[in-house]
């Protein structure tokens, strides 16, 4: 594959800056003068808006800044990219982060785009979800799928462990997920019901649907919140995960909800956004969503104004050792209501408000998700 000496990073058709390799394993980034004049920091803590070259650390993202690591496919998406690379005679382990960003081009999550881009053409997509699920299953079982090009086109830029496709449905951008090799067949229905329950708990979630299947209870789909239809065209919205913003790996539990509450305030300066994070914490605790790592929280930014992204990846789950990936005032195995209240107190919330929110969410979760939680 062609080497990449530098990449131009763009957003809304405007050049944000230049990303280039440095020494052997690092990268450097420099904001463009025109972006400094009218733009904003795309990652306030690690890439402040200023003139001059800024150098990434070697860890935790192999010499890449977290906000650009967010653009790279992870889990399922990386598996597809590596399959395509091998088919083209390339060795995936030898492909640099900048080459991988060039493969992403303009198809990544969020709004950042990379030029020049490498592109593979593929066939017209058919929305046969049962067939696509079967092709995904072949990949997971290390078999050769019939439609690798289509799977790559639809899911090669995605993150997360579960197979998924990104496509247009009724003129809107959607993500549709399929079971992984370790998921129960009803995982789609479970995530659908979890998301509806979260909405009932006052948590902002994307629009969701359960797409019918002849083989299982249905496939979970959610409308993309990093895309918006405006006057007949799709606008991309800048997005950054907590992992990217704080430069921490989501593979190693290293955060507490006190940090997430503090981050929310620092970015948004909005007490309502802080309360959103508190509600999400309460839901994750009561609903046993313990895979609450730093990639499962994101923020959106429009014109330099940050806000908490809608909640996603909500389902019954466990992390390392069965504990929460993000601890609750230091407690990961069995966080209590008192632990929740301490997090709220540290964030400046009134105890009465914190307790009322926790009580309401606990009751709603027990009523609507009890069938998943009983005996577990």
Image (tube, grey):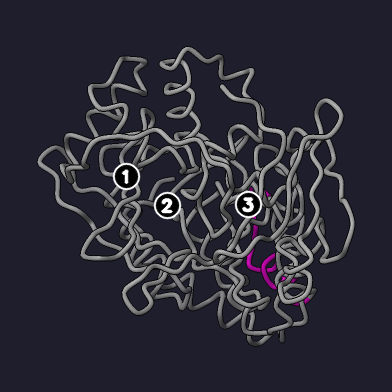
Q: Is residue 257 magenta?
A: no
Q: Which residues are magenta?
A: 332-345
- Closer to the chain start, of discs 3 and 2, is 2
Main secondary structure found in the magenta portion? helix
Can you tell which quarter of the image residue 302 is in?
A: bottom right
Name above or below for residue 14 compared with residue 93: below
Q: Nearer the viewer, residue 63 or 189?
A: 63
Q: Nearer the viewer, mark 3 or mark 2?
A: 2
Does 334 lie within the magenta span? yes
Residue 6 x/y as whole percent: 71, 40
- Marks 3/1: CA–CA distance: 24 Å
Report if the CB atoms under discs 1 and 2 are less than 8 Å apart.
yes
Other residues around mark 2 within 10 Å, as few (<14) / some (14–19) / many (≥20):
many
Q: Secondary structure at mark 1?
A: helix
Residue 165 lies left or right of residue 86; in this view the side is left
Closer to viewer: mark 3 or mark 1: 1
- The Cα atoms of the two marked residues, 1 and 2, are separated by 8 Å
Q: Quadrant of the C terminus?
A: top left
Task: Find residue 334 and name its label.
Answer: 3
């Amino acid at each position: 594959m062609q080497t990449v000496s530098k990449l131009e990073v763009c957003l809304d058709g405007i050049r944000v800056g230049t990303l280039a390799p440095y020494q052997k394993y690092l990268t450097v980034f420099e904001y463009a003068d025109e972006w400094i004049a009218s733009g904003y920091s795309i990652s306030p803590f690690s890439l402040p808006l200023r003139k001059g070259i800024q150098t990434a650390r070697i860890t935790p993202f192999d010499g890449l800044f977290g906000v650009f690591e967010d653009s790279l496919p992870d889990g399922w998406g990386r598996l597809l990219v590596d399959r395509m690379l091998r088919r083209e005679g390339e060795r995936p382990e030898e492909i640099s982060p900048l080459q991988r960003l060039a493969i992403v081009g303009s198809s990544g999550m969020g709004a950042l785009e990379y030029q020049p881009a490498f592109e593979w053409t593929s066939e017209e997509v058919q929305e046969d979800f049962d067939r696509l699920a079967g092709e995904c299953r072949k990949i997971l079982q290390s078999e050769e799928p019939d439609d690798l090009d289509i799977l790559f086109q639809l899911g090669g830029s995605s993150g997360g462990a579960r197979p998924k496709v990104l496509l247009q449905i009724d003129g809107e951008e959607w993500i549709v997920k399929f079971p992984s090799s370790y998921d129960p067949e009803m995982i789609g229905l479970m995530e659908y019901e979890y998301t509806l329950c979260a909405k009932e708990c006052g948590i902002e979630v994307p629009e969701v649907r359960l797409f019918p299947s002849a083989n299982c209870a249905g496939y979970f789909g959610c409308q993309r919140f990093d895309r918006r239809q405006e006057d007949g065209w799709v606008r991309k919205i800048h997005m950054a995960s907590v992992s990217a913003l704080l430069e921490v790996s989501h593979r190693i539990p290293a955060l507490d909800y006190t940090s997430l509450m503090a981050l929310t305030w620092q970015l948004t300066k909005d007490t309502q956004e802080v309360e959103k994070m508190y509600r999400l914490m309460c839901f994750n605790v009561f609903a046993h969503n313990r895979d609450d790592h730093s990639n499962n929280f994101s923020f959106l930014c429009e014109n330099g104004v940050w806000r908490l992204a809608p909640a996603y990846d909500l389902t019954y789950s466990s992390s390392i050792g069965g504990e929460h990936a993000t601890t609750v005032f230091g407690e990961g195995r069995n966080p209590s209501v008192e632990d929740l209240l301490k997090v709220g107190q540290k964030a400046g919330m009134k105890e009465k408000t914190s307790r009322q929110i926790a009580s309401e969410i606990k009751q709603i979760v027990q009523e609507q998700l009890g069938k998943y939680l009983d005996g577990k």
